[in-house]
Image: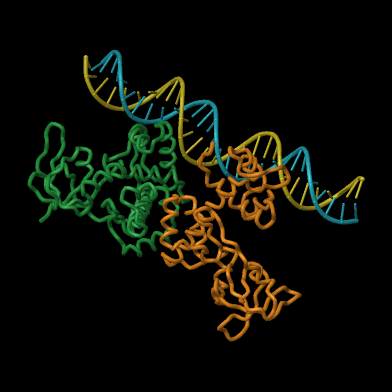
Chain colours: A green, B orange, C yellow, D cyan
Amino acid sequence: MKVPLSQAEQDYLKAIYRLSNRYGRAATSQLANWLEIKPASVTGMLRKLAQADPPLIAYKKHKGATLTPDGERAALEMIRHHRLIELYLHEKLGYAWDEVHEEAERLEHAISEEMEARMAAALGHPCRDPHGDPIPDHNLEMIALSEFPLSELGPGQPAVVRRVRDEEPSLLQYLDLLGIRPSTQVTAVAHNKHDHTLTLQIAGQERPVVIPPRAASELFVDLME
Amino acid sequence: MKVPLSQAEQDYLKAIYRLSNRYGRAATSQLANWLEIKPASVTGMLRKLAQADPPLIAYKKHKGATLTPDGERAALEMIRHHRLIELYLHEKLGYAWDEVHEEAERLEHAISEEMEARMAAALGHPCRDPHGDPIPDHNLEMIALSEFPLSELGPGQPAVVRRVRDEEPSLLQYLDLLGIRPSTQVTAVAHNKHDHTLTLQIAGQERPVVIPPRAASELFVDLME
DNA sequence: TAAGAAATTTAGTTGTGTCTAAATTGTATA
DNA sequence: TATACAATTTAGACACAACTAAATTTCTTA
């Protein structure tokens, strides 16, 4: 019976995609927390998404939700919109990388497939957004990722920052200030076992900087050959 | 208590702006017809908009609605968004002029003031959209218009097309086919009193064309000095 | 100016997506 | 394994913006 999805439904599917990628499934309370609504409200929507025709999620009471192939397609469609828009705003309209998320969050629901295609073409069919997040291609396929958390980088290993898995403006501004963004070259100097901070040498800079654990686990890097 | 307007409210205000500009006020049934909802549904929204704080419309039962200064400001804000987006899609993303309206209709509600400003700057602070409709400036002031309907153009008078006051793709495609768009130079050859068609000579073309009344009253022109 | 037609409003209903409060289920541990 | 705590679901309510059907008001014209 394929009916267009509401913005709320699309937001749920995106959130389930994100949480089930990280944790295998999306729990009611995690969704409530991420979407900033009450757990009781989530239950109703999960039942609705599970009983849709075709079903968009697999849902068992008290067991959380995972996406069906149909649900995943819908989620990836929104993610493609979101990331293309972020890059477009950054490249074509001069937005800073900490300003693009909020705008994209609203626009992703409003653009047509036509506009998606035209933006993708104008950007040369890119595969990363300004934070380094991969952009699903036209068929919603995502490139394979080799990067891993900066917090797991061995001391002395040179690496390239690929991705910041966070949209919070304050964190992004802070990283910008330090001179860390996708493509920045870095080397771990030392891990502090007590407070889990990381001392990091940034290529082209005099002195190492200390990275708080929050940032170190949200930054993803690739080893340099 | 100034709360952000819903998309439905913004659409009502835009419709009231358009209708009261043409007819002095917006009647319930005109609004219902334009917005494609039932008259009964309009009544409730008009009461709500009139009782908002601050009031956005002046509304007397059975007398239709007009915008208050606050309501007009909100309407012009959406109109500025809409027309900037139309021009942006046309100029920067290669949309044809009959494709921009539908996309802008959704995007106008989703863009921020920041994005409005950046698009306006990228376009050089334009004052007309692809159909020739005036774009309110940053302070929501609109340029004075001197154009008048093509249907009132005297025979033999050379004129310039300024504006097509319609968004219907089929009409726009038809005009495009004839070679009529803003800035096209034309001369009226004759008005047919019986079927109200207009015979029109288009500059640079061999033979005159016959314009149906629907098009002649939606096309606006300026006299050439 | 009275009757019929047209426009508008009222009253009551629906579907969405949220909420609170209370009941239930699952999990961890003592 | 009993129990206490946390997570989840159920039940019932609400705001919004639409709807239908019926009542009312206004307009037109004979």
Total number of numbered discs in the rendering: 0
Q: Position of residue A181 (x, y in %)?
A: 23, 51
Indicate whether A74 appears above or below B86. Answer: above
Considering every residue shown, the one lying at the far left of the view is: A156
Residue A141 visible in the picture: yes
User: Seen in the image, is B212 located left or right of residue A142?
Assistant: right
- In terms of image quadrants, where is residue B161? bottom right
Residue A1 visible in the picture: no
User: Seen in the image, is A15 located left or right of residue B88?
Assistant: left
Q: Position of residue A71 (x, y in %)?
A: 37, 48
Indicate whether A138 appears above or below A211. Answer: below
The front one of B190 and B119 is: B119
Residue at (41% x, 56% y) in the render: B118
Q: Quadrant of the C terminus of chain B?
A: bottom right
Indicate whether B220 appears above or below A80. Answer: below
User: Seen in the image, is A102 located left or right of residue B108?
Assistant: left
Q: Position of residue A112 (x, y in %)?
A: 44, 57
Considering every residue shown, the one lying at the far front of the view is: B225
Q: Quadrant of the N terminus of chain B?
A: top right
User: Seen in the image, is B62 located left or right of residue D30?
Assistant: left
Q: Position of residue A61 (x, y in %)?
A: 37, 33
Residue at (53% x, 39% y) in the render: B2
Residue at (57% x, 73% y) in the render: B175
